[in-house]
Amino acid sequence: MNHDFEYYNTLLVQSVGGKVGPIAPTITPSAAYGYADAQEAEGIFSGEVNKPLYARVGNPTNAKLEGIVAKIEGGFGAIATASGMGALSMVTTALLKSSDEILCVGGFFGGTYTLVNETLKRFGISNSFCTINDFDYMEQKLSEGVKMVLLESVGNPSLRLPDLKAIADLCNRYETLMVVDNTATPLLVRPLDLGADIVVHSTTKNMSGNSTALGGIAVFRAVKEEGDKLLNEKYADVHKFVKKAGKKAFIPICKKRAIRDMGMTANAFGSFLTMLGLETLALRVERINNSVAKVAAILEESLPEGIEVNHPSLAKSEDHARYLSDFSNGCGPLLTLECGTPERAFRLLNNLKLATLTANIGDNRTLALHMQSTIYSDFDEEARRFNGVTEGLIRVSIGLEDPEAIAEDFLQAAEAV
Ligand SMILES: *Cc1c(COP(=O)(O)O)cnc(C)c1O
């Protein structure tokens, strides 16, 4: 199902705002909640009574955000977390255990790469990596019984565009969970519609847009009462949740196996700020995705020799065909500049007047950063290469400014390199 921006413009303001009483979402800043009587307490803890229990496992402001993002993604339920890494930690630790293997497809955001390759590994969860089009390897790994496939809708900063539908079909054939990090492309692709099981976002990025709130969220599909892949023998340790909670089983799986014990919960004020951002998400995503293509085209035409712009909207991109077919409204706010050497990249960055140098993406302002010396500084050469990071690579996240002014800033900065 491909919804247009007008659908989301209506959905977002209508679902964030209240119709009667307070228009803005209500912030509930209480850590604990009183129960009417002992029986109600028992009901709340068993899940039969749907009222707040304690803020580590849920909060009414978070619940409102969860309902809205579930609608955006066409999901059945969602859990808001303290950060995007919190969402990824929650999903992986709730569904995997020591001796399981996770298959990672394509290049990753730095934190996700180290989560899988260092932290989860320390707890006995092994991993394998392959490039986005290596279907033979994926099928081999799936047939060997990997428990989860993890990928980004758009590689950050590799900008590779995976065939989400084909990968989902393969995961479904082998009854294996597919988790998609959709941080870069909210409203642009809906992985759950294509057959994925879980979508995660860093809401810190596009969803808030204004750099006020760190946050993350995981969105889940409904679990089928019969024949669901979660009932496959390899997921035996979560079968009791499916039996008890049916369709919404992913929620207690994540709450009881991660949130309750590790506490990567969102806070009410952060969720409030995220919802303020959400009201204008469709306007911003439409504007920014048009601007990215415009800026990429101007830079391709006019950058001096020795500096190259990369973006899937450009005909030279290896994923141009998929950009046209699967990402028809754009593939997010990023483009990259290849400057050849770190020295040239530093000079270009230091010449910029409009862009802000920072490690964020999806902001209302245009941002830029040299990858190798920052987010990927403690990665070895092979890991950098796999994640698409060359020594002269600058990642740019396009903002709401006049696209011609943005292009002009990068052109003047490049001239002096
Ligand atoms: C930023 C980011 C994350 C991590 O999110 P935080 O909110 O910073 O924890 C995960 N995935 C992608 C693609 C990101 O850009």
Image: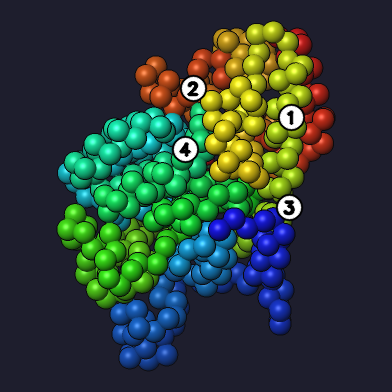
Precedes in sequence: disc 3 or disc 2: 3
The answer for how far apart the CA atoms under marks 1 and 3 are is: 18 Å
Type of amino acid at the residue the image marks with label 3: Leu
Precedes in sequence: disc 2 or disc 4: 4
Residue at x-position 72% and y-position 74%: 23
Q: Which residue is mark 4?
A: 162
Q: Which residue is mark 1?
A: 295
In the rendered image, which quarter contains the C terminus?
top right
Secondary element at tag 2: loop
Q: How is the image coloured?
A: rainbow
Q: From where the camera sits, is residue 221 visible?
A: yes
Say which of marks 2 and 4 sits in front: 4
The answer for how far apart the CA atoms under marks 2 and 1 are is: 21 Å
Precedes in sequence: disc 2 or disc 1: 1
Q: Horizontal and vertical percent for residue 409?
A: 78, 24
Type of amino acid at the residue the image marks with label 2: Val
Secondary element at tag 1: helix
Query: Would you place residue 75 above or below residue 363 in this image?
Result: below
Q: Residues within 10 Å of mark 3 (few under 14, many from 20)?
A: some
Residue at x-position 33% and y-position 91%: 39
The answer for how far apart the CA atoms under marks 3 and 4 are is: 25 Å
Q: Which residue is mark 3?
A: 283
Q: Residues within 10 Å of mark 2 (few under 14, many from 20)?
A: many
Secondary element at tag 4: loop
Type of amino acid at the residue the image marks with label 4: Pro
Residue 126 or 22: which is nearer the viewer? 126
Check if mark 4's residue and mark 1's residue have beta carbons within 8 Å: no
Check if mark 3's residue and mark 2's residue have beta carbons within 8 Å: no
In the rendered image, which quarter contains the N terminus?
bottom right
Mark 2: C-beta under 8 Å from nearest atom of ligand 1 = no
Residue 36 or 145: which is nearer the viewer? 145
Secondary element at tag 3: helix
